[in-house]
């Protein structure tokens, strides 16, 4: 719901503050091991055409060896682990927003894929997956006689 507010103008969403408060409460009462890595981590973009789906995931600070990617029953699962920053003696955090610990993100794919032909690249903290569409699930043109 977007409404008019005389102080804020058009586009003010009164529920923004409630969502912000909810995120802060989740962070406050969440597990110290998750420390902000939740069900929506890593953030994903997914797009597709008739030949493939492409998924990009932001996973900064995670070594490629700590990533586990699988495709089973049209579900893509990305699992991994990020170690916390170790601080030196005499140092203390002033702000600690980056999450650490284990994460798991599973998303349904728009079609069946060829798991043996999936390509994965990891560069500059972005994981890019190319998931070729299974031949049996490709759209086919049917001629009317």
Image: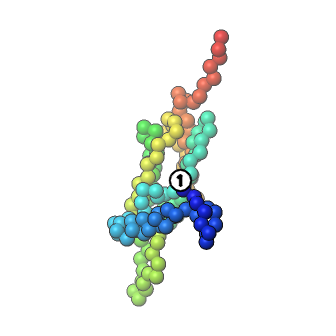
Which image quarter holds the C terminus? Answer: top right
Q: Residue at x 63, y 63 (%)?
A: 10
Q: Nearer the viewer, residue 42 or 19?
A: 19
Q: Residue at x 45, y 75 (%)?
A: 96
Q: Position of residue 16 (x, y in %)?
A: 51, 64
Q: How many marks?
A: 1
Which image quarter holds the N terminus? Answer: bottom right
Q: Secondary structure at mark 1?
A: strand
Q: Residue furthest top?
A: 145
Q: Position of residue 39 (x, y in %)?
A: 42, 56
Q: Nearer the viewer, residue 45 or 12?
A: 12
Q: Is there any visible trace of residue 129 in the rendered image?
A: yes
Q: Residue at x 51, y 57 (%)?
A: 43
Q: Residue furthest bottom?
A: 90
- Quadrant of the rendered structure where residue 103 is? bottom left
Q: Nearer the viewer, residue 14 or 84?
A: 14
Q: Which residue is mark 1?
A: 44
Q: Residue at x 63, y 23 (%)?
A: 141
Q: Residue furthest front?
A: 6
Q: Is residue 94 above or below residue 72?
A: below
Density class for disc 1 (Cα within 10 Å; few <14, some 14-19, many ≥20) is: some
- Quadrant of the rendered structure where residue 37 is? bottom left
Q: Position of residue 29 (x, y in %)?
A: 34, 68
- Quadrant of the rendered structure where residue 104 is? bottom left
């Amino acid at each position: 719901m977007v409404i008019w507010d005389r102080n804020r103008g058009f586009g003010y969403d009164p529920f923004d503050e409630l969502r912000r408060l909810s995120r802060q409460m989740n962070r406050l009462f969440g597990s110290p091991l998750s420390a902000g890595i939740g069900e929506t981590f890593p953030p994903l973009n997914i797009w597709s055409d008739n030949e493939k789906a492409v998924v990009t995931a932001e996973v900064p600070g995670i070594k490629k060896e700590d990533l586990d990617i699988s495709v089973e029953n049209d579900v893509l699962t990305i699992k991994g682990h990020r170690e916390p920053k170790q601080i030196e003696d005499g140092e203390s955090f002033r702000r600690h927003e980056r999450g650490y610990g284990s994460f798991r993100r599973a998303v349904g794919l728009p079609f069946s894929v060829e798991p043996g032909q999936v390509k994965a690249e990891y560069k500059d903290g972005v994981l890019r997956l190319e998931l070729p569409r299974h031949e049996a699930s490709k759209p086919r043109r049917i001629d009317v006689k």
